[in-house]
Image (cartoon, helix red, strand yellow):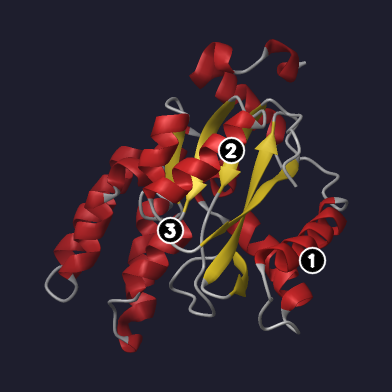
């Protein structure tokens, strides 16, 4: 399972974690054994096709663990990551910046909204969610910040933590605004990983636990091989996205990828 990757660059990387059935904690642990979890990451290569980048086991999330994951990816052939979409994992943005210093870190908007709504009463969740949507569906980053200020003015009295959290993470919440609306959703969510995990959970739901990491990895590796065979089409509007990357990132996009 330590095969060399054959795509050189990985344009998008989707990363996340999950601690059980709590929807507020993230999205991609796929199996448990003892006190450890197995993590999976996927990427979109220069042809616009999704690829499974690897499986890793870990007992605790943190900068050291994510540094090992990213170093492993680099050693196996990933030379560049344009945008890494993560769900607010502890230490992950710093680890990405260390191994792939030119990568942009995009925090998953879906997870940011979920985390925000954890502070809101059930009666007001719909209204708060609608106002948060105005922020991330704005036309530009400047307009989004204006919407954030309006949100804070309306809701800070009841839920001050939400506005503070969005301001604190603003740098990593807004990279997707540099891209056209029709490809933003591909960039600003880890939905691809969540969809993959739903398929993997169907495979392991009859196995509440595994005796060791090797047993879990073997089952999941076979399942991933089967799932990946269905990934035959590129991401929607991929050509437009790649052209935008070429404009913004210059020589980091190989010329032959644009042909």
Question: Tag 2's secondary structure?
Answer: helix
Image quadrant containing the C terminus: top right
In the image, 91 versus 186, the foreground residue is 91
Residue 174 shows in this picture: no
What is the C-alpha distance between the residues marked 3 and 2? 16 Å
Is residue 34 positioned above or below 56 on the image?
below
User: Residue 88 location in percent, x, y?
Assistant: 39, 55
Question: Tag 3's secondary structure?
Answer: loop
Which circle's residue, 1 or 3, is located before the other in the chain? 3
Is residue 59 positioned above or below 173 on the image?
below
Name the image quarter holding residue 126. Answer: bottom left
Residue at horizontal 70 percent and vertical 61 percent from the top: 196
The answer to whether the residue labelled 1 contacts the one labelled 3, judged by CB atoms less than 8 Å apart, is: no
Mark 2 Cα shell of 10 Å, populated few (<14), some (14-19), many (≥20): some
In the image, 203 versus 76, the foreground residue is 76
User: Residue 202 location in percent, x, y?
Assistant: 76, 76
Identify the residue under disc 3: 61
Residue at horizontal 56 percent and vertical 75 percent from the top: 34
Identify the residue under disc 1: 219
Is residue 105 positioned above or below 149 on the image?
above
Residue at horizontal 56 percent and vertical 66 percent from the top: 37
User: Residue 248 location in percent, x, y?
Assistant: 49, 20
What is the C-alpha distance between the residues marked 1 and 3? 23 Å
Identify the residue under disc 2: 72
């Amino acid at each position: 399972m330590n095969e060399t990757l054959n795509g050189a660059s990985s344009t998008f990387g989707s990363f996340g974690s999950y601690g059980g059935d709590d929807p507020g904690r993230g999205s991609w642990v796929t199996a448990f054994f003892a006190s450890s979890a197995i993590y999976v990451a996927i990427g979109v290569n220069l042809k616009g096709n999704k690829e499974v980048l690897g499986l890793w086991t870990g007992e605790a999330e943190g900068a050291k663990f994510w540094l090992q994951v990213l170093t492993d990816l680099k050693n196996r052939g990933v030379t560049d990551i344009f945008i890494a979409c993560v769900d607010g994992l502890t230490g992950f943005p710093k680890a990405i910046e260390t191994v792939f210093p030119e990568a942009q870190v995009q925090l998953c908007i879906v997870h940011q909204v979920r985390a925000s709504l954890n502070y809101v009463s059930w009666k007001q969740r719909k209204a708060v969610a609608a106002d948060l949507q105005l922020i991330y569906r704005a036309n530009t980053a400047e307009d989004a910040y204006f919407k954030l200020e309006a949100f804070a003015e309306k809701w800070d009295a009841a839920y001050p933590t939400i506005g503070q959290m969005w301001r604190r993470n603003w740098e990593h919440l807004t990279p997707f605004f540099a891209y056209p609306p029709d490809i933003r959703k591909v960039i600003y969510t880890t939905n691809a990983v969540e969809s993959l995990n739903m398929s993997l959970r169907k495979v392991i739901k009859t196995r509440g636990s595994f005796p060791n990491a090797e047993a879990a990895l073997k089952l999941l590796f076979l399942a991933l091989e089967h799932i990946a065979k269905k990934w035959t089409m590129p991401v929607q509007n991929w050509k437009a996205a790649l052209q935008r990357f070429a404009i913004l990132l210059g020589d980091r996009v190989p010329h032959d990828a644009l042909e």
